Amino acid sequence: MVIRSLQYEVNCSILFTELPLLERPAAAKDAGFDGVEFWWPFPVAVPSDADVDTFVRAVRDAGVQLVGLNFSAGDMPAGDRGLVSWPARSQEFRDNVDVTVGIGEQLGCRAFNALYGNRVDDARPGEQDALAVENLALAGRAASRIGGTVLVEPVSGAPRYPLRTAADAVGVVDRVAEQTGVTSLGFLCDLYHLAVNGEDLDRVVATYGSRVAHVQIADAPGRHEPGTGELDLDRHLGRLVDAGYDGWVGLEYVPSGASADSFGWLHRATA
């Protein structure tokens, strides 16, 4: 199986939610993982220095690598999906950039996911897209100072989120490069979101495999661990490897039971 040749890390914002957030990196380490990623782990875009230090210490003390970190994306449970293209909260995103990249610098994280943002009623789509170019370029410049990459991701389950396909995300990456010269952006290939949105995953990998900067997985339908749905994740991951992808694979699924019990598929593949 191709699965055994890849390096996996745990998204601690969706797994190990049985535990307080700061205990989750250690739980991931205890489960056999050397890497973790997080959505924005604070309730505000600019947390206190003390709160940042506490988070950094929890990751370091767990002995895991912070592989990925989202910029502040608003109130995700309430339906927000990013601040990048949201005029009323653009400054909030900009204020968050240096904090996010600063955490990355401390922990050796070089991948920063910038959720694009939903369409809003008080701005035209073209206005939002122009703002997104500005904000992504700003974030890209900040990330590039530490050798980092800003990720652009298609998302499912959010009707007003405009990036639904691989072409949508790659188009944004290219637009930022063409209009601003900033090239430190990449395509986040989340196989679950793309499949739910109706994408042909074989075609996506064949067309955009060389553009993939980070990979996340969950099975579909259900968004649970591999083996609980219908996706041939082993085949799709294998084709990504064939296309040259050699980075981490983020486990961004809702476990069907206890988090610690949801890794049997991986243990079987690597035994």
Image (cartoon, grey):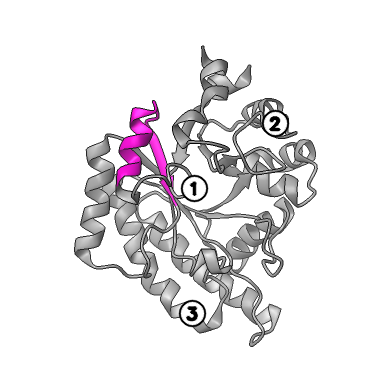
Looking at the picture, which amino acid does disc 2 mark? His
Q: CA distance from mark 2 to mark 3?
A: 37 Å
Give the residue number, with chain letter if any, for mark 3: 89
Mark 1 residue element: loop
User: Can you give x and y, in whole percent of width and height, for residue 24 in the image?
Assistant: 35, 42
Asked if the stretch drawn in magenta spans residue 109, the answer is no
* Residue pictured at 56% horizontal, 16% vertical: 268
Q: Amino acid at mark 3?
A: Arg
Front: mark 1 or 3: 1
Quadrant in which residue 173 is drawn: bottom right
Q: Mark 2 and mark 1 in contact (Cβ < 8 Å)? A: no
Q: CA distance from mark 1 to mark 2?
A: 22 Å
Residue 103 rendering spot, x and y as whole percentages: 30, 55
Neighbour tally class for label 3: few under 14, some 14-19, many 20 plus, Cα within 10 Å = few
Upstream in sequence: badge 1 or badge 2: 1
Q: What's the amino acid at mark 1?
A: Ile
Span of residues in magenta: 23-38
Q: Secondary structure at mark 2?
A: helix
Looking at the picture, tell me which residue is in the foreground, 84 or 62: 62
Check contact, mark 2 vs mark 3: CB within 8 A.
Answer: no
Q: In this figure, which residue is indicated by the disc labeled 1?
A: 14
Picture coordinates of residue 149, whole percent (x, y): 47, 51
Picture quadrant where residue 121 is located: bottom right
Query: Residue 236, which numbered label?
Result: 2
Q: Quadrant of residue 213?
A: top right
Q: Would you say the residues marked 1 and 3 are in contact, meaning their CB atoms lie under 8 Å apart?
A: no
Earlier residue among tags 1 and 3: 1
Q: Is residue 39 above or below residue 31?
A: below
